[in-house]
Image: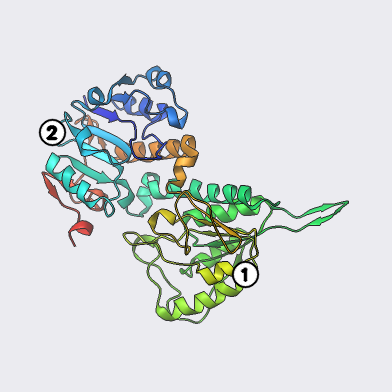
Amino acid sequence: MTKIAVLKETAAGETRVAATPETVKKFIGLGAAVSVEKGAGLSASISDAEYEAVGATLGAAAVVAKDADILLGVQGPDPKALKGVAKGAWIVAGLDPFGQRKRVDEYARAGVEALAMEFMPRVTRAQGFDILSSQSNLSGYKAVIDSAGTFGRAFPMMMTAAGTVSAAKVFIMGVGVAGLQAIATARRMGAVVSATDVRSATKEQIESLGAKAVFVENVAGIEGEGAGGYATEMSDEYKAAQAELVSSHIAKQDIVITTALIPGRAAPRLVSDDQIKSMKPGCVIFDLAVAQGGNVEGSKPDEVVIKHGVKIIGYSNTPAHLAADTSALFARNLFNFLSAFWDKEAGRPVLPNDDEITAAIRLTKDGKVVNERLLG
């Protein structure tokens, strides 16, 4: 019988958990045995009793990991935690392969097969496996909610006997999953919303959500779309034109939310000190990319930075601030992935070597690092 282990996350500030009672029950339904470290779900509002009620075995970390065939995680476990796992055991988690390259080498030396869920290709059949999308969705929502709390003024226009309160103006920079959710959330709260992106295809998406699209026209570099639908680097001409357009627009905004990330690289700089200076005192900027170097000049993870009277905020781990919901979605991503490859006869998931998903997410196998993105 395949043993699936779920350990308590040890990374600083990590409150999520890789399996919920819902997914544990489903794994057991497939014929697996599931063992959960005591207290693993507490920070995500899941008690040990809830895991036990659906059939999980609870214990200390070493007991949970012993003879495990599959180790589930939100973030990659410390290689020391792998002592006692079955030969060739799988690690299925968000592994930060570029930021934790040395740890990947340690996984290889430990003889485990490390599967990086954030490397999941953006193909139709893998949509339900995509941890980046599920976590970014709630991150975009959280960015708006916390920006509103920091702003200190109302979002919707209000007409009262004492006069009219103007609607807040919110500008979203970067219209991926997080950006689209930020637009939708800010609109629901009554703000006047505008947005921009380097990918021309997002213009229609922005407008479909009732926001104003702010785009540079007739300049090379507007396409901005790389492999898998992710943003890529812009041309120098486009960067200059965009900076000029954004500078004039940003000065009129109350809240700016930046979401731009390029896989494997530092976050692109979108908002300069001069642009911050052009904003009115009391305005707010939320930098969703602050943990990857930041889109905003001067932003710092988990700190409120005040520059020119503007408050700049952002978290090193935004999904961890909504642990119950983000854990539920993350856990479903992992179950969807493993169940899609579950072989009933083998009693465990089997990844075909010639499958595009296997090639994309497999980092290590048979004691070696095998992923082309890490070997190139």
Q: Residue at x 17, y 48 (%)?
A: 105
The kind of secondary structure element at disc 2 is: loop
- Where residue 88 appears, as percent x and y from the top left, is 15, 37
- Where residue 274 appears, as percent x and y from the top left, is 54, 72
Label 2: few (<14), some (14–19) or many (≥20) C-alpha neighbours in 10 Å? some
The reply to whether residue 120 is in sight is no
Q: Mark 1 highlights which residue? A: 251
Q: Is residue 114 left or right of residue 120?
A: left
Q: Residue at x 33, y 21 (%)?
A: 56
Residue 325 disc label: none
- Where residue 284 appears, as percent x and y from the top left, is 59, 57
Residue type (three-letter) at the residue carrying disc 1? Ala
The reply to whether residue 368 is in sight is yes
Which quarter of the figure has residue 214? bottom right
Circles 2 and 1: CB atoms closer than 8 Å: no
- Where residue 148 appears, as percent x and y from the top left, is 63, 50
Q: Residue at x 41, y 79 (%)?
A: 236
First-in-chain label (2 vs 1): 2
Q: As displayed, is residue 43 above or below residue 205?
A: above
Q: Nearer the viewer, residue 136 or 105?
A: 105
